[in-house]
Image: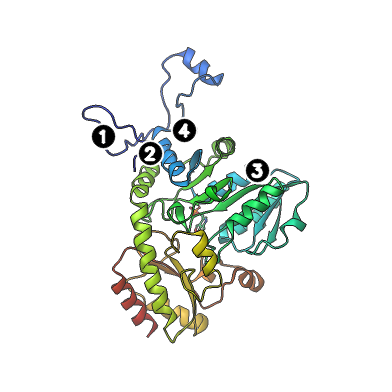
Amino acid sequence: MHAGEVHKGVGGPVATPVVQTSTFTFESVEEMKRWAEGRSKADIYTRYGNPTLRVAEAKLAALEGAEAALVTASGMAAIASTLLTLAGAGDEIIATRQLYGGSYRLMRDYLPRFGIRVRYVENDLKGVEQLVTARTRALYTETPTNPTLRIVDLRRAAALAGRFKLVAVVDNTFATPVLQRPLELGFDLVCHSATKYLGGHSDIIAGAVAGRRALVEKIRQTVIHLGGSLDPWAGYLLIRGIKSLEPRVRRQAETALRVARFLERHPKVARVHYPGLRSHPDHRLARRQMDGFGAMLAFDHKGGLAGARRFCQRIRVFLLAASLGGVESLAVLPIYTSHYKMSAKELADAGVAPGTVRLSIGLEDPVDLIADLKQALA
Ligand SMILES: Cc1ncc(COP(=O)(O)O)c(C=O)c1O
């Protein structure tokens, strides 16, 4: 709530001021020179830094238990800038295979253009030892995974990374720091699509990186030079979202468990993917690693793609929309959104079936959500 805020004096604002400016004045030419020489920390241009964004960064660092944090123009800006900081031409990255579609595309289609090779392991991390070479720089993972909510053992991943001196990076978007704090488990860096739970209201695109200060500051330079800096107004909305993060995530996760239990008993549902269910293959690991199971879930419709399409056509309280983590509940078909244009093998690797429906549970009354699912499945 309070991290990064400066509350002082009579008449000071309680809400964070939005410093909506692209540029800042210098007091003198001498100060300009001091800045150029690295002797002044003054703000000179918002792409390099901005007081509102620093408040957001302080809050993120506090939430993740990080030395430092950085906000970016999107989750992809955070992930791309992180990987392009850690690896260059000739280097390699090892990644778990089940990733958000955009992260996977970055690794499949773009990093190789810069001479960076990505090698994949399954979520159980088997075979990392065999893939490490002298040029491997980072171990990248995501948990729970999108969209089938598989869990990667973060302690094990951090230990492997430590053993081979790789920088351990995890996308913590689905869990949020409320439910999972990877830095406490030995990770070096955490990335976020702050568009999701951190913003929380489906009204901004933003990203974040938190972790060891020296690494975060290197990534900041990449963000500055590749141009992925966040706009201050979006930074303000991010701050506003972060202030209610904890109660939102907890209530949304409670509702998700109720929804998952309802779906698990429904005759038209072949399988529910929710780590809070005992039937989930990673339930025990999730219980150990997370402080709650989150508000994302997926299910496979028994009627395959046709059944899933019918369901999506009929929902009324859930909105048919990509993205997740906001206060409104959303439904999507991953084969048409995050996993569009993927081969049958890529879909199988990701655990996505044609009839898989992904749900992001919002803050509506759980009774209304379950009634909606009931009528849409009928
Ligand atoms: C797990 C995960 N990581 C990263 C991203 C990318 O974030 P953004 O859309 O903010 O660039 C997403 C977006 O859906 C996501 O779900």
Type of the residue with mark 2:
Ala
Mark 3 and mark 4 in contact (Cβ < 8 Å)?
A: no
Spatial CA distance of label 2 from label 3 is: 28 Å
Spatial CA distance of label 4 from label 3 is: 21 Å
Indicate which disc, 4 or 2, sits on the residue closer to the N terminus.
Answer: 2
The spot of residue 137 in percent (x, y) is 70, 46
Q: Look at 39% across and 46% down and name the residue there.
A: 238
Indicate which disc, 2 or 3, sits on the residue closer to the N terminus.
Answer: 2
Type of the residue with mark 4:
Gly
For residue 210, above or below residue 366: above
Tell me the quarter of the picture where residue 248 sits: bottom left
Using the image, tell me which numbered label, if any, was put on residue 230.
Answer: none
Mark 1 and mark 2 in contact (Cβ < 8 Å)?
A: no
Q: Residues within 10 Å of mark 1 (few under 14, many from 20)?
A: few
Using the image, tell me which numbered label, if any, was put on residue 13.
Answer: 1
Spatial CA distance of label 4 from label 1 is: 21 Å
Type of the residue with mark 3:
Leu
Spatial CA distance of label 1 from label 3 is: 39 Å
The spot of residue 274 in percent (x, y) is 48, 70
Which is in the foreground here, disc 2 or disc 3? 2
The spot of residue 23 in percent (x, y) is 43, 29
Using the image, tell me which numbered label, if any, was put on residue 49.
Answer: 4
Left or right relative to 65: residue 165: right
Assign a secondary structure to mark 2: loop
Q: Residues within 10 Å of mark 2 (few under 14, many from 20)?
A: some
Give the residue pinned by disc 3: 86
Assign a secondary structure to mark 3: helix
